[in-house]
Image (tube, rainbow, N blue to C red):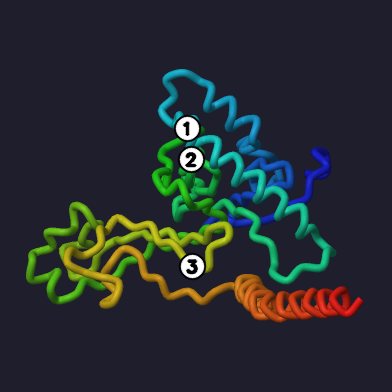
Amino acid sequence: MAKARQAVRSLELSADGEQFAVFGGDRRVRVFWFATGKLRRCYDETEAAMAEMQRAEGGAYTLDSIDFGQRMARERELGLHWEATAPGAAQATPPQFPNAVFDESGNFLMYATALGIKVVNLVTNRLAAVLGRVENTERFVRLALWQGTVKRDRKHRIDGGAGDAAGGRAVGGSKYMQDPTLVTTAFKRQRLYLFSRREPEEGGDDASGGGRDVFNERPAVHELEAAAAGAGAAAAAPMSLFGGAAGAAGGAGGAAGG
């Protein structure tokens, strides 16, 4: 990083402590061996690299031109946000710099990009999957991965574990199942997003908590301040109009008196 003259914006260790991944100010994700400090992998996620990927004909991850343009505009806005929240600068909220997380095996690396959340196989050095690609209105930033096992409820056990094929798999035929969950944040969003193998339960709604989206976040401080300022301006507008009308009437009276 010193040779590239770039600051480290985030750092994550693998579960076994043998590797660590950093996100640099040049928008490159680098993976190092912890014991030797040698660079293992480097992935370029700059706007130029994404534009080159978009121009590649027949690419598996090529987007519609309008969709790609909107994502690039959001990426530039995110870049301005990072510049405005540089270390040492006065800021109301801390900046959200992307991070790259390992799975439990240390063979896969996940990090958020403008195209979605990339899952890279570090052994083969190939892109294994892109999560959240269809969520084109969100720019995911921070990630946290949980790969433990959860206890299945009674209804699931009565059904005979029919959902294991789609939502994970039973562990040793017991009442526990594997359900890896990726928790993410997004730029300018006051909420968390969860990626899982499970599908939302049918018939659920937001009121009962069974739906896909739950809108329970509070408005941000800057949104409340903007709303208050707008209300104050609207309340002051009639007074200024009345004052102007009174002045005009006074002027007319003076002209008549003359």
Q: Name the amino acid, label 1.
A: Arg
Mark in front: 3 vs 2: 3
**Label whose residue precedes the other's in the sequence (3 or 2):** 2
The residue carrying mark 1 is 126
- Mark 2 vs 1: CB contact within 8 A: yes
Q: Earlier in the sequence, mark 2 or mark 1?
A: 2
Q: Eyeballing the image, is 103 above or below 230?
A: above
At mark 3, the secondary structure is loop
Viewed as shown, does residue 180 lie left or right of 161? right
Residue drawn 53% across and 58% down? 186
Q: Position of residue 212 (x, y in %)?
A: 31, 63
The foreground one among 29 and 112 is: 112
Can the viewer see residue 42 in this picture?
no
Q: Pointers 1 and 3 in contact (CB under 8 A)?
A: no
Residue 181 screen position, x and y as percent: 38, 60
Residue sitting at the far right: 258
Question: Which quadrant of the figure contains the N terminus?
Answer: top right
Q: Which residue is mark 3?
A: 191
Q: Is residue 161 above or below residue 215?
A: above
Q: Nearer the viewer, residue 180 or 123?
A: 180
Q: Secondary structure at mark 2?
A: strand
**C-alpha span from label 1 to label 3:** 31 Å
User: Where does residue 255 sit, x and y in percent of width and height?
Assistant: 87, 74
How far is the residue under mark 3 from the one under mark 2? Answer: 26 Å
* Amino acid type of the residue tagged 3 in the rendering: Arg
Q: What quarter of the picture does the C terminus occupy?
A: bottom right
Asked whether 81 or 225 is in front, the reply is 225
Query: Disc 2 to disc 1, how far (Cα)?
Result: 6 Å
The amino acid type, in three-letter code, at marker 2 is: Val
Residue under label 2: 120
